[in-house]
Image (spheres, rainbow, N blue to C red):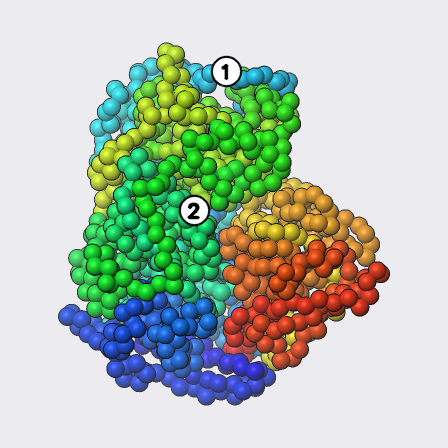
């Protein structure tokens, strides 16, 4: 048995003792997992490094490890992403975490791919607040645990530089006319603040069936007050006509935080009320969490916290945190990152290698351990041809996504090459890289080339750093040109894609992989209505297909039908990181407003830019007021709609949907839209590019053929088609050149440095150990260290376990640990009510990830969870001994009182979706010992082992059904003391009808580090024991 004894890098109480090049690592070998003897060796200078002969010097005297000095012809044939991994292995080789044989495995990639297990020490860690808060809470709790064992709490600090961006706490409490309606801080009552409900309520009328809904009319024009319309300017009267068509408002040189211009008066107006109110509510609602984050920024060294209202994590990473190359103590090396956000992969578009990991893995890296991975296969994606002028970047993204998904590249790296790459701008590349989770690649890597350098020249890179970047990348052969095919690396496989083949698409109505050509949208939606309930179908009865429900909203009558749009969101995920598509949306809005079109006021429209940079260029280009006029007001900066933080629909809209059992729709420019995720009564959700989101919002329905039907009708009765207002590629590119310039990035840096006044004024403790507030419902000391012992116990066999759940295929992380609002009838709600909180104060599961009591109760609390014990969706299960149907948490709690261990039975792709550590922590605290499934998402498989849960797979060809399991049996699994990688185990099954039955499973333990974690009961006890 192999194990390790780690000496954590020493930390000075006064300040961080930065050890030269971070090579002060431990070399140790322990013959027994129970032994504590170790041998230590420290590399105190570069001359003692095993690869010191590779050190080279640039013209300016900066040193670097040059893999080309190996004089190994294999290096020149490696994919560039593998070269980055190799450089890190050479630089961090210490004989303990990274060994010389690991370096040789990287060099021998062509033979060792998909075989060798290798370590990767990234340059930094990226956290967002939803997934970052449990990691920081764990570190705070670890300090407590070590103090009880007599250990200095200051020894617990991140070793790897860590950035935590607070961006996931923003909720859409206010949007457009919703300010006069009802803010909803956390799923509670929707009573208006300061105004009687009747002033803005919407009342449904009786249901009727009609063959059609008549022509779509724009909102009523006229009105003397701009404040009553979308995008109010706050003027006392507004009878002036809009600015003349075809002209921008004149103030195109505005900078962020300068007054916007009203498109009707060309006069300055203040920042939208929606953003200010949403930001204020965010800080009030999350005060405890923010105080904890501020304590972390002061108590932990090597932690940088980016406060709220700066931007979304992936865009702050792109625009501010990205180094491309690091320079430390006179040594230059490539930037690389692992992050707890699924959008971490976006950074690969800049030539920076990075991918998403679970919170548990991130904690390991923070504490100085490398990421363990199987040497990946690298698929070369060769781009050829030219992009159609009418095709948006999102169409290219979705086209490439489709090709890669069909290529079955799950778990592999993708690296782009070929002449077509040079046609893609850096925003295009980062958008494509951001879609990795949708085709299950680990990364989509665009090597640094001339296009990348030109981009950095427009941003905040100094000329000196640009010269350093170019000279270093060329010196280590990490710079690409595409003119000479002889320079192309050798790939595991090559996929060729013609850029000219892409046409506009949307994705939906339930899954991101179900793409629909915009030209086929109407026909496809009608087909979905009629199909049986499944991945696309809704099974609407033929006599209900034409159902319409009239309702009242703000004193006017409207009608809803199948396909009616009720949510239209341009949000921070994936799409609005690309200036071209955001500017296209703004130009479309401008042309639509000038043509006399509008958006129905009951549609929940919102604009949540990734950072202030987006607001900056929309403002500078003059299109932001037009987006606001259509209801797409800036509501704040951060994730909102995509993680379920959508304010309730107007009451009349929600009631009308339920009354008519309508398939209402949402359209958003994100990359996540599982059924019921946006709002529980919105069944059909589509992903689309930002300009298409605006187009569908104007149309008010997805049941439209843009080629044959008008987008809307002007007050004069003129039909306006999409082609009449769709901006040309030349218009978009020209506007992008005029507005997206270096000043935008300089403004973001200024915003970062200036900070947030409310954040600056927050008080926080000044202690080494966090003073836990027993009354807090946000931050709670977790139970992971309560039984921490100095010695390791051998793994316990699982005897007479019951199945807590019997699940099918495609159980996502949203099913396991929801991130959205807390239902008022859930187990978590009962807990919060017991703490004297009102439903308005519940907030979301994501915001309460620092409280294990809430998160354990929220595990498997999704309304879409399909448990075969129950036969219908919902967070319920069967307590087998009593036969009672209970909440999942209540059943697990009863099993624990009875001393009965638990397992879970599942089908294929268990644990797919966004990475979050509570998908493993929650089942662990519920008492789940093992999960038996047909297949697992790789990252989730590792997360389970990191929490001491054993992932087991059925043998090939076997399933729970083929084994005739009812799930109500008792299961016993004998675990040997010498548990090995991929160990074959036997599950004994006992039931009244089948005594002595058994079947085989495989323990999905793929690395030595995973095995060590499991033996210790998880990563956290393992790391804590190394310091005792």
Residue 755 locus on image (x, y percent): 35, 50
Disc 2, SS = helix
Which residue appears farthest toward the top when viewing the image? Answer: 716
Vertical arrangement, residue 542 with respect to residue 810, above or below: above
Vertical arrangement, residue 201 with respect to residue 929, above or below: above
Q: Is residue 1009 visible?
A: yes
Vertical arrangement, residue 811 with respect to residue 662, above or below: below
Q: Please indicate whether residue 447 sits to the left or right of residue 665 in the image.
A: left
Of 586 and 483, nearer the camera is: 483
Label 1, on which residue? 214
Vertical arrangement, residue 32 with respect to residue 954, above or below: below
Of 82 and 586, nearer the camera is: 82
| Nearest to viewer (mark 2 / mark 1) | 2
Mark 2–mark 1 distance (CA, rounded to whole Å): 36 Å
Residue drawn 61% across and 73% down? Answer: 983
Q: Is residue 780 visible?
A: no
- Quadrant hosting residue 271: top left
Residue 883 has which mark? none
Label 2, on which residue? 402
Residue 102 locus on image (x, y percent): 40, 77
Residue drawn 36% across and 47% down? Answer: 431
Q: Residues within 10 Å of mark 1 (few under 14, many from 20)?
A: few
- Quadrant hosting residue 322: bottom left
Of 575 and 387, nearer the camera is: 387
Residue drawn 28% across and 45% down? Answer: 385
Residue 848 locus on image (x, y percent): 56, 51
């Amino acid at each position: 048995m192999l194990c390790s004894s780690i000496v954590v890098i020493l930390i000075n109480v006064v300040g961080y003792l930065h050890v030269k090049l971070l090579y002060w690592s431990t070399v140790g070998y322990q013959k027994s997992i129970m032994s504590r003897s170790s041998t230590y060796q420290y590399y105190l200078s570069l001359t003692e490094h095993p690869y010191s002969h590779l050190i080279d010097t640039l013209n300016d005297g900066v040193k670097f490890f040059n893999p080309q000095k190996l004089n190994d012809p294999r290096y020149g044939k490696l994919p560039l992403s593998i070269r980055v991994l190799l450089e890190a292995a050479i630089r961090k080789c210490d004989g303990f975490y990274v060994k010389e044989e690991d370096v040789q495995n990287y060099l021998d990639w062509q033979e060792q791919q998909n075989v060798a297990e290798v370590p990767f020490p990234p340059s930094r860690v990226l956290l967002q607040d939803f997934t970052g808060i449990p990691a920081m809470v764990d570190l705070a709790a670890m300090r407590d645990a070590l103090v009880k064992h007599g250990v200095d709490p200051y020894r617990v600090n991140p070793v790897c530089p860590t950035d935590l961006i607070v961006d996931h706490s923003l909720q859409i409490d206010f949007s457009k006319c919703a300010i006069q309606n009802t803010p909803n801080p956390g799923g509670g009552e929707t009573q208006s603040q300061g105004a009687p409900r009747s002033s803005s309520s919407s009342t449904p009328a009786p249901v009727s069936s009609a063959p059609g809904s008549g022509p779509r009319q724009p909102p009523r024009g006229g009105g003397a007050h701009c404040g009553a319309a979308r995008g109010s300017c706050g003027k006392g009267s507004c009878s002036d006509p809009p600015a003349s068509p075809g002209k921008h408002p004149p103030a195109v040189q505005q900078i962020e935080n300068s007054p916007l211009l009203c498109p009707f008066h060309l006069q300055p107006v203040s920042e939208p009320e929606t953003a200010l109110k949403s930001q204020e509510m965010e800080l009030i609602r999350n005060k405890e969490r923010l105080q904890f984050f501020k304590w972390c920024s002061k108590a932990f060294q090597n932690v940088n916290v980016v406060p709220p209202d700066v931007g979304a994590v992936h865009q702050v990473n792109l625009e501010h945190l990205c180094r491309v190359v690091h320079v430390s103590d006179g040594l230059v090396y490539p930037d690389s990152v692992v992050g707890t956000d699924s959008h971490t992969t976006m950074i690969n578009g800049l030539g920076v290698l990075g991918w998403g990991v679970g919170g548990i893995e991130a904690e390991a890296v923070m504490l100085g351990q490398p990421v363990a991975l199987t040497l990946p296969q690298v698929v070369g994606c060769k781009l050829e041809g030219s992009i159609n002028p009418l095709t948006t970047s999102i169409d290219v993204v979705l086209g490439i996504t489709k090709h890669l998904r069909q290529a079955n590249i799950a778990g592999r790296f993708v690296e782009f090459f070929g002449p077509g790459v040079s046609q893609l701008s850096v925003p295009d590349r980062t958008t494509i890289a951001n879609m990795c989770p949708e085709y299950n690649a680990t990364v989509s890597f665009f090597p640094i080339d001339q296009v990348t350098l030109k981009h950095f020249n427009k941003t905040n890179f100094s000329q000196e750093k640009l010269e350093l970047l170019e000279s270093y990348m060329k010196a280590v052969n990490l710079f690409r040109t595409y003119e000479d095919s002889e320079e192309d690396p050798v790939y595991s496989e090559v996929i060729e894609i013609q850029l000219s083949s892409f046409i506009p698409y949307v994705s939906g109505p339930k899954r991101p992989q179900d793409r629909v050509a915009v030209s086929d949208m109407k026909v496809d939606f009608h087909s979905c209505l009629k199909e049986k309930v499944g991945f696309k179908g809704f099974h609407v009865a033929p006599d209900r297909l034409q159902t319409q429900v009239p309702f009242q909203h703000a004193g006017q009558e409207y009608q809803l039908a199948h396909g009616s749009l009720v949510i239209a969101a341009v949000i921070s995920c994936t799409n609005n990181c690309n200036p071209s598509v955001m500017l296209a949306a703004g130009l479309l809005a401008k042309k639509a407003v000038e043509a006399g079109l509008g958006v129905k006021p009951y549609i929940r429209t919102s604009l949540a830019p990734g950072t202030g940079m987006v607001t900056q260029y929309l403002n500078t280009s003059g299109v932001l007021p037009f987006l606001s006029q259509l209801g797409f007001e800036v509501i704040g900066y951060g994730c909102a709609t995509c993680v379920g933080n959508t304010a309730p629909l107007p009451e009349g809209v929600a009631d009308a949907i339920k009354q008519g059992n309508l398939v209402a729709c949402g359209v958003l420019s994100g990359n996540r839209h599982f059924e019921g995720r946006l709002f529980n009564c919105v069944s059909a959700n589509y992903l689309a590019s930002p300009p298409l989101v605006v187009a569908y919002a104007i149309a008010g329905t997805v049941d439209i053929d843009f080629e044959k039907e008008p987008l809307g009708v002007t007050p004069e009765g003129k039909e306006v088609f999409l082609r009449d207002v769709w901006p040309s590629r030349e218009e978009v590119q020209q506007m992008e050149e005029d507005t997206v310039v270096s000043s935008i990035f300089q403004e973001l840096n200024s915003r970062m440095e200036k900070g947030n006044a409310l954040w600056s004024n927050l008080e926080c403790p000044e202690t080494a150990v966090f003073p836990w507030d027993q009354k807090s419902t946000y931050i709670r000391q977790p139970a992971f260290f309560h039984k921490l012992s100095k010695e390791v116990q051998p793994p316990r066999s699982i005897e007479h376990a019951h199945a807590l759940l019997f699940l099918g295929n495609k159980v996502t992380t949203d099913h396991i640990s929801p991130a959205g609002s807390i239902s008022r009838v859930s187990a978590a709600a009962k807990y919060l009510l017991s703490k004297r909180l009102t439903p308005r104060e519940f907030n979301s599961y994501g915001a309460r990830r620092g409280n294990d009591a809430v998160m354990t109760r929220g595990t498997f609390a999704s309304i879409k969870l399909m448990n075969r014990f129950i036969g219908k969706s919902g967070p319920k299960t069967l307590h087998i001994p009593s036969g009672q149907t209970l909440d999942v948490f209540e059943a697990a709690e009863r099993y624990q009182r009875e001393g009965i261990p638990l397992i879970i039975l599942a089908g294929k792709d268990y644990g797919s979706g966004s990475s979050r550590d509570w998908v493993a922590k929650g089942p662990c605290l519920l008492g789940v010992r093992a999960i038996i499934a047909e297949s697992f998402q790789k990252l989730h498989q590792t997360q389970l082992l990191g929490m001491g849960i054993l992932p087991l797979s059925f043998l090939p060809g076997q399933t729970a059904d083929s084994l005739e399991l009812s799930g109500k049996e008792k299961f016993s699994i004998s675990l040997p003391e010498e548990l090995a990688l991929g160990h074959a185990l036997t599950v004994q099954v006992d039931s009244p009808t089948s005594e002595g039955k058994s079947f085989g499973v495989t323990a999905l333990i793929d690395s030595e580090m995973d095995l060590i974690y499991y033996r210790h009961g998880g990563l956290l006890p393992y790391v804590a024991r190394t310091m005792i």
